[in-house]
Image (tube, helix red, strand yellow):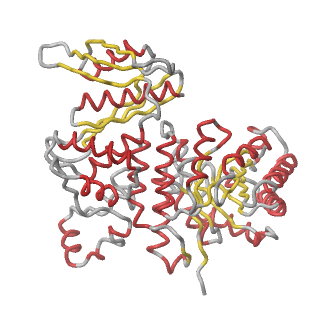
Amino acid sequence: MKKDKVIFFDTTLRDGEQSPGASMNLKEKLLVANQLAVLGVDVIEAGFPVSSPGDFDAVETISRQIKTSTIAGLCRASEKDIKTCWDAVRYAKKPRIHIFLATSDLHIKKKLQKTRTQILNMAVKAVKYGKGLCNDIEFSAEDAGRSDMDFLCKVVEAVIDAGANTVNIPDTVGYTTPVEFGNKIAEIKKRAHNIDKTIISVHCHNDLGLAVANSLSAIENGARQVECTINGIGERAGNASLEELAMALRVRPHYYNVRHSIKTNELYNASKLVSRLTGISVQVNKAIVGANAFAHESGIHQDGILKARETYEIMNPSDVGVPESSLVLGKHSGRHAFFKRIKDLGYRLANKESELLFEKFKNLADKKKTVFNEDIVALIEEGATSCCKETFVLDYFSAASGTGTVPTATVKILKNENNKKQAKPIVFREAACGSGPVDAAYKAIDKIVKMDIKLTEFSLRAVSSGEDALGEVFLKAKYKGMVYSGKGASTDIVEASTKAYMQVINKAIVD
């Protein structure tokens, strides 16, 4: 007898991006979407099209480019939202409209200020309207975890009759416990007379640290779609972690007795990509993809592993794509070796992008003896995080500091105006003093751009090992109430910091 399939619905680009400061630009979203497709994700929720022009463009672009996965867009239960969503996903080979509406009395009364009858009618009307546009409709009963069971079942039956292909039961605020949530799914399966006409989905949040446990309990009780994110990122404490769900089902196949299409050896690549693009680090003891997930320090553990890996590892590192070897490249390496390594790392770049990357690699190789895998990935993703159009370009900088001296910095910045008649960019030069060389460089830049930017977060890490390690700076800053992120990499910390700051400035100008 063939096992039931569990559909993996990834919402990293929608719910995951709603993590404060985790927003991504179009190029970054495309990188993630392509990785999700390689990973074997069944449904990619690409965004919330009506929320902003940028989100609409991202969903539309992903719909045009990704052919293997269903592409979904989220929308509220209104004709404007649904039509906008359809306009964005309609170009997908397999489009889906995902409609949500709250069903808990708390949300109905306090947030929506409506009655249960009004909510039921709105849900049915929305699904019918969506069905007239798209054959694949998903309906989410927001805050189902705290919804009255009688009313929830009534809504589920009504939207299925209206044409919903998938009915999502979200634990929107992470309130339920595994046994409780599993029982809720079993009760819906038992009481909704037409439930066999649809797929039950679950979307669990991690406010009590139970998102994965609740999702697995739902699968045990009949749910056949799980909504999750890479690294479990998302609103507040995040969502159910895709990598943990996929490996739980793989490691315990006889217990759950289901199958899925996730290519688990791509989990590590996906985790690293999302972490670096969003700036949200993966905790070292994170299951499956954390730095310590396959690390052993205890002598007893090491002895056991040497004798038989299974003594202390229930998974093989290669099952999740954890790399076990280092890449050694230097200034004498040629194009063929470099381009092959890019491909081996899982990246597919256009010829022009590859050539630009090779130039950056050569410049880096002149500064350090060995270029590692991590250095190359940092160069690739630094290019992805940059703005499509750079109004201000750093042409030159110089910084000086030392014991008993005042740190100073001088910068030369080129400004590209929108006026097409302008033949050359405008050149600005400024110098400033600061509490340190980075602060001085930022103050010199501020004199030129004249933007009131407030730095809120600054982090520095070594991308690789050694005295000449590539340093990566990630920062967040506020401008006119919006939070922007920037990233820069260099063997010179001041240069990396300046690159990151220039990214923030150009992103703020584009918005």
Q: Is residue 364 left or right of residue 106?
A: left
Front residue (pair 473, 225): 473
Question: Residue drawn 58% across and 44% down?
Answer: 58
Residue 59 position (above or below residue 325): above
Identify the image quadrant of residue 223. bottom right
Q: Is residue 281 left or right of residue 490?
A: right
Position of the N terminus, as image quadrant, is: bottom right
Q: Position of residue 143 (x, y in %)?
A: 68, 50
Tell which residue pokes out farthest to the bottom in this image.
Answer: 1
Identify the image quadrant of residue 115. top right
Q: Position of residue 75 (x, y in %)?
A: 70, 46
Question: Residue drawn 54% across and 28% down?
Answer: 511
Q: Is residue 27 left or right of residue 322?
A: right
Q: Please give the count of numbered marks on the rendered protein.
A: 0
Question: Residue drawn 17% across and 19% down?
Answer: 401
Question: Residue drawn 77% across and 61% down?
Answer: 164
Residue 20 position (above or below residue 155): above
Q: Position of residue 180 (x, y in %)?
A: 63, 62
Identify the image quadrant of residue 437. top left
Q: Is residue 505 left or right of residue 212?
A: left
Front residue (pair 68, 52): 68
Residue 208 position (above or below residue 215): above
Q: Position of residue 53 (x, y in %)?
A: 63, 36
